[in-house]
């Protein structure tokens, strides 16, 4: 156990878990998904998925990890008695670790680029929307920029993960999460008080039920899993460093609560400002890069807010990338008996290679930006297949495994060990057995059907 590392305290664990959850998913992806998918109705469906699927699956993942003290492959192997299917699902978690890490670091690299731009005064004055657009496209079409920054993030993440659980991951989260939260509140207040923000607030807060569609529901489900770091074994791995003393449902509730809070706040920062600047909500992954500079320009002392904000987002992204990288690394350390150093080097190099075409898919390569025959970029494919679909598959199997293979009773016994209480144990069992897996399947089938039915 001692060589695997462990969390130093309950607070340290909650902050590291929240650090994993809170990242680009909340600050970059949630606002643009909300913008792309009809506003408030998307938020509403997202919240339902967080409560009824995300929270129960998080308790399951943490418990599976804590009980076995293993990475996802080792955990499935042990609790299934070595069954191939389940080891394969553990393998899917490890593959997700490689792939999600690779594209996620691309966006984290963009944030560093924007930190530099803000610090060098590029957004000190109010710019036209066209000027902001052109700053973004000039930046992302420079291959050296995007690939180099991607490398920087992969390198920094590798360094933190190499330092291990307590010294690296936990310390980073403990200090910086509260500051990030404070800055988001200040920016949200500024954004909602901009002239013309009202229309954005309406878009964000009044659901339009005519916008419900299969794709929108799938996106909301994917976003709930992604932002809570579920479906790829991150919480299994983090749970494996957790002691029996801790109350899993309570820790999971805090992590879920913080994550939702940051998502909602990020929406209040971005969407009212989109309306105030007369921009379009549906700009996809570029959204925050085109909106934030205008907010900073409109704030007294905006230069400092801008620089501070991007520094914190880089850190929020790093506390998430380390949790993603930790999954494949824990696999190689536990199952293959590799050293931590070799595992980090191997996984980080592969992830950098896979991420490179994703980094070039924002204009640096025409081919990767507009893949022939489909309207998608290489980045869109990576982030949808591995940031959404594969997480839903993972979460489905984790729910089925806990409910039907390991068993709700054994899980509850472990959760309640050392005198911990789990008053909603029965409801949890019900959600995990009947609601989570079947909802995931139904949403999948409905989406495929709605795509084919046009
Ligand atoms: N939850 C992180 C975010 O929202 O930025 C991303 C993430 C981390 C996804 C860990 C999946 C994961 F296992």
Image (tube, rainbow, N blue to C red):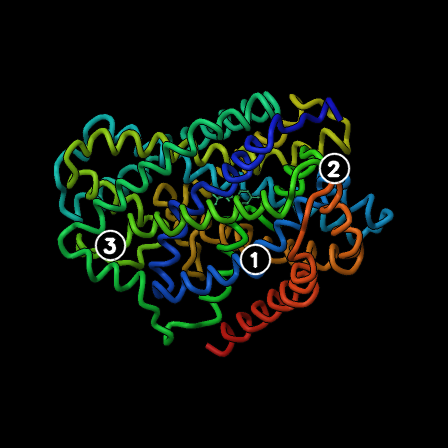
As drawn, is 142 to the left or to the right of 52?
Answer: left
Q: In front of the other: label 3 or label 1?
A: 3
Which of the image's four quarters has the N terminus? top right
Callout 2 crowding tier (Cα within 10 Å): few <14, some 14–19, many ≥20: many
Residue under label 3: 272
Residue under label 2: 70
Spatial CA span between label 3 and label 1: 30 Å
Q: How many marks?
A: 3
Residue under label 1: 389
- Is residue 414 visible from the viewing direction of this image? yes
Callout 3 crowding tier (Cα within 10 Å): few <14, some 14–19, many ≥20: many
The spot of residue 294 in percent (x, y) is: 19, 43
Spatial CA span between label 1 and label 2: 25 Å
Q: Is residue 150 above or below residue 445?
A: above
Q: Is residue 68 above or below residue 163?
A: below
- Label 2 residue near ligand 1, CB within 8 Å: no
Q: Nearer the viewer, residue 53 or 282?
A: 53
The spot of residue 309 in percent (x, y) is: 31, 34
Q: Residue at x 25, y 34 (%)?
A: 306
Say which label, 1 or 2, has the lower sequence index. 2
């Amino acid at each position: 156990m001692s060589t695997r590392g462990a969390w130093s305290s309950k607070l340290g664990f909650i902050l590291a878990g929240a650090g994993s959850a809170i990242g680009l998913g909340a600050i970059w992806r949630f606002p643009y998904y909300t913008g792309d998918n009809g506003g408030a109705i998307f938020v509403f469906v997202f919240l339902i998925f967080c409560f009824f699927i995300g929270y129960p699956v998080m308790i399951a993942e943490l418990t599976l990890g804590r009980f076995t003290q293993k990475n996802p492959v080792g955990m499935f192997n042990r609790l299934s008695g070595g069954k191939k299917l389940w080891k394969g699902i553990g393998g899917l978690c490890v593959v997700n670790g490689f792939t999600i890490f690779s594209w996620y670091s691309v966006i984290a690299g963009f944030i560093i680029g924007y930190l530099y731009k803000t610090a060098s005064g590029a957004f000190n004055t109010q710019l036209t929307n066209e000027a902001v657009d052109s700053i973004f496209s000039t930046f992302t079409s420079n291959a050296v920029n995007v690939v180099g920054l991607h490398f920087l993030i992969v390198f920094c993440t590798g360094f933190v993960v190499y330092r291990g659980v307590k010294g690296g991951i936990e310390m980073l989260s403990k200090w910086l999460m509260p500051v990030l939260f404070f800055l988001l509140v200040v920016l949200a207040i500024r954004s909602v008080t901009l002239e013309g923000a009202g229309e954005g607030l309406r878009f964000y807060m009044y659901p339009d039920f005519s916008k419900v569609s299969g794709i929108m529901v799938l996106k909301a489900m994917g976003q709930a899993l992604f932002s809570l770091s579920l479906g790829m074994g991150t919480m299994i791995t983090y749970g494996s460093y957790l002691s029996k003393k801790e109350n899993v449902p309570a820790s999971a509730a805090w992590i879920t609560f913080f994550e939702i809070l940051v998502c909602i706040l990020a929406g209040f920062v971005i969407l009212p400002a989109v309306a105030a600047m007369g921009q379009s909500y549906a700009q996809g992954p570029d959204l925050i890069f085109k909106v934030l500079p205008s907010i900073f320009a409109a704030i007294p002392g905006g230069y400092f807010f801008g620089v501070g904000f991007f520094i914190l987002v880089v850190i929020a992204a790093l506390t998430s990338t380390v949790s993603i990288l930790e999954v494949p690394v824990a696999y190689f350390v536990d199952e293959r008996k590799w050293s931590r150093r070799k595992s980090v080097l191997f996984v980080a190099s592969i992830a950098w290679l896979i991420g490179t075409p994703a980094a070039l898919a924002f204009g640096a390569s025409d081919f990767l930006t507009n893949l022939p025959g489909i309207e998608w970029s290489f980045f869109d494919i990576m982030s949808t297949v591995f940031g959404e679909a594969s997480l839903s598959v993972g979460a489905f199997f984790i729910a089925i495994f806990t409910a039907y293979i390991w068993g709700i009773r054994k899980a509850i016994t472990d959760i309640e060990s050392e005198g911990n209480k789990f008053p909603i144990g029965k409801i949890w069992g019900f959600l995990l057995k009947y609601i989570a897996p079947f909802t995931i399947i139904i949403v999948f089938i409905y989406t495929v059907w709605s795509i084919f039915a046009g």
